[in-house]
Amino acid sequence: LGSSFTLGRTLGFHPWRMARQTLGDRTALLLSLLLSALLSVIFGTRTSFASAVITRFLLGLGNGISGAVKRAAIDRARTKTISGDDSDGSNDGGDGSDAANHSSSDEEEKEGWAV
């Protein structure tokens, strides 16, 4: 069962990337969440092993969540690092110095990010 999900997820990676580019990240994420919810319910109603394997494959194929979430996290981190925005105070180390956003390795980290 697990391998059918992984196979579906692997085969669905590129189509979901194209969907995010065409529909936008938010729409693709919502569509993927809807498909995941629907297919999870269907998977729960399967009574034979073969239909469960097929449903898990389709669940993996419809799982475009990880790409959209990774992209949103990268965009958020990139925006936060470039603008120096630390409004939530999570990176200031508790002393208000905001040392995490101004370390000498920031430029090295930015260069290694994939677009």
Image (spheres, rainbow, N blue to C red):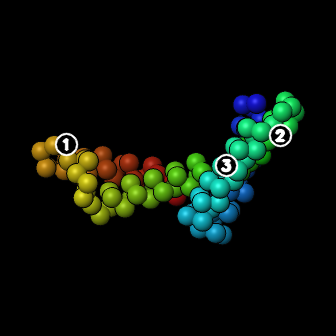
**Closer to us: mark 1 or mark 3?**
3
Image mark for residue 54 = 2
Badge 1 element: loop
Q: Few, some or many C-alpha atoms within 10 Å of disc 3 (few <14, some 14-19, many ≥20)? A: many
What type is the residue that disc 1 sits on? Answer: Gly
Q: Nearer the viewer, residue 6 or 59?
A: 59
Q: In which quadrant of the rendered view does residue 3 lie? A: top right
Spot occupied by residue 85 in the image (x, y as percentages of width and height): 27, 60
Which quadrant: the N terminus? top right
Residue 15 picture location, percent across and down: 72, 57
Numbered disc in front, either 2 or 1:
2
**Label 1 Cα neighbours within 10 Å, binned few <14 / some 14-19 / many ≥20:** few
Q: Is residue 93 visible?
A: yes
Q: Does residue 57 appear in this view?
A: no
Q: Is residue 35 left or right of residue 109?
A: right
Residue that carries the numbered disc 1 in the rendered image: 93
Secondary structure category for the residue under label 3: helix
**Label 2 vs label 3: CA separation?**
14 Å
109 lies left or right of 99: right
Q: Are marks 2 and 3 in contact (CB under 8 Å)?
A: no
